[in-house]
Amino acid sequence: MKQTRSKLNFRKDESLDRLAEVFNVAQFVSYAPGAIPTQAYARVLGYEPNHQFATISDAVEVLLTRSTERTVNVRSFLPNDPRSHEFLYGLSDTESVVAAVNRIAGAGFHVIVNETIDVSDGGVSGVLEGGIMEFAPDDTPRCVEKPGVASLPRRQAIDLLTTVYGFRIEIGFGDEFRLEFSIHPKPCGWKHTNVIGWELERVGCKALQAKNTWPNAFSRHIGDKAFGLMMAMQAGLPVPHTTVIGRRVAPFSFGLETGGTEWWIRTCPKEQVPGKYTTHHGWLDPFRLMAEEDSSGSAIASVLSQRGVQAQYSGALIVDATGKPVIEGKQGEGEALMLGTTLPEQLPKTVREDVLAAFNYLREQFGAVRFEWVHDGVKVWIVQLHRGATQSAEGVLVPGEAEVWNRFYVSTGLNALRDALDTLHDNEGIVLVGEIGLTSHIADVVRKAGKPARNIVRDEPATV
């Protein structure tokens, strides 16, 4: 169906006033140009729509008092000129705001004084259109013009954000509308709710396709593991009950009770860093853990407190260079397997079939995926989920040629492997000597480094 747009030629303040009839907007008072500015529109918490304030000073004082940030912005525009004009941000002094309104309106511009809405308060901004929602933290709705936004089907996005922020996100417009919005942990706006509308237009009924890839700006906001687990849960697969203790958002929980009585603590980096940060069987102080392992706050987004699964078997699945799923695991808990200190074991046929069924189900929704799993004897639980295949095949972890091949003995450990990879020159590759699983953190670390990498079981004089 051909997409049509019908954006009426309203002034910016008139458009806000019309949107305010059906949705929450930032509190504002607007003025028409002139030597003595005339109030045009007003939407202020606790006042009737378009209440007429006695003076500009009265309006500004009320806005400052009722604004969440206790500051306002002064915006200027000309009705038939789309160019940006003077914009003053975060003013807190009544006299300064009044002087700015008089000066700008006196120069022939329309003026909007609106409450400051902090886009870096832990919430998100974005656009809802055509059945999809795209959004990012620490930005305006224009974030959708940049790479890295989260892009999900409408219902899935609303469910995700409702879980993270702990309040219902009510958006009463159909897919034929395009809504620019922002979502905030604290209520704001003239209706004092958590969702602000910035612009609404009818665009027809064309259905858009969500990208649904991660890492993205929002997955980094709450942590890569947390986002992946929420995707697995929304796909309908069992995920252990998990509480996310984040740096930027209040704690939130999701997932199912496992029947276990123990807990795991898992650090949750912004992006996957295989095996570098703590995973601990039992309780640890999450705040101390973040302070000790990432004092700058630049790497770890959150800590996960996750209910333990009574593990009969544990392991991981990746997709290799041929597109084939590779399943590895062992009896009991799988931490040693992931760290590369033990090798994969022969798995029962029923366990392999259950893991493969989970993979096929996830592949239908996300394409190629890799995940860590735990089997309790009845079903498979997903404990990590990431998108994408690997380039690995038997004996070749990362394809490519090198002038110099440096040997690394896997018994040396993960930290030594990271150091070795960091010192490789452009013309060098690495040969891992020792048995490893293709799904282990050792293999993951090598793949993320992107250097040519091969694996041999024992140190032999044969060429590689």
Image: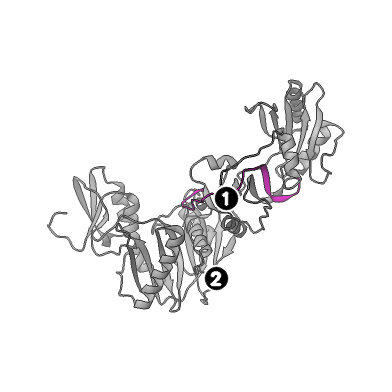
Dividing the picture into quadrants, the one containing residue 443 is: bottom left
Q: Main secondary structure of the magenta part?
A: loop
**Segment colored magenta:** 190-217
Q: Horizontal and vertical percent for residue 421? A: 30, 50
Q: Amino acid at mark 1?
A: Met
Q: Secondary structure at mark 1?
A: strand
Q: Is residue 437 above or below residue 375?
A: above
Please indicate whether residue 133 sits to the left or right of residue 92 in the image: left
* Residue placed most toward the observer, 454 or 83: 83
* Residue placed most toward the observer, 156 or 397: 156
Q: Residue at x 42, y 55 (%)?
A: 272
Q: Residue at x 68, y 46 (%)?
A: 196
Q: Which mark is residue 381?
A: none
Residue 212 is a magenta residue: yes
Q: Horizontal and vertical percent for residue 364? A: 44, 62
The tag earlier along the polypeptide, 2 or 1, is: 1
Q: How is the image coloured?
A: one colour
**Residue on which disc 2 sits:** 256
**Residue on which disc 1 sits:** 133
Question: Looking at this rendering, what residue extends furthest in the right direction?
Answer: 54
Q: Amino acid at mark 2?
A: Leu
Task: Estimate how packed mark 2 is, as few (under 14), some (14 to 19) or many (20 or more) residues with alpha carbons within 10 Å.
Answer: some
Residue 118 is a magenta residue: no
Q: CA distance from mark 2 to mark 1?
A: 26 Å
Question: Looking at this rendering, what residue extends furthest in the front direction?
Answer: 1
Q: Horizontal and vertical percent for residue 387? A: 42, 56
Q: Residue at x 74, y 29 (%)?
A: 96
Question: Looking at this rendering, what residue extends furthest in the left direction?
Answer: 461
Q: Is residue 252 above or below residue 95?
A: below
Q: Horizontal and vertical percent for residue 23? A: 72, 47
Task: Estimate how packed mark 1 is, as few (under 14), some (14 to 19) or many (20 or more) residues with alpha carbons within 10 Å.
Answer: many
Residue 277 appears in the figure: no
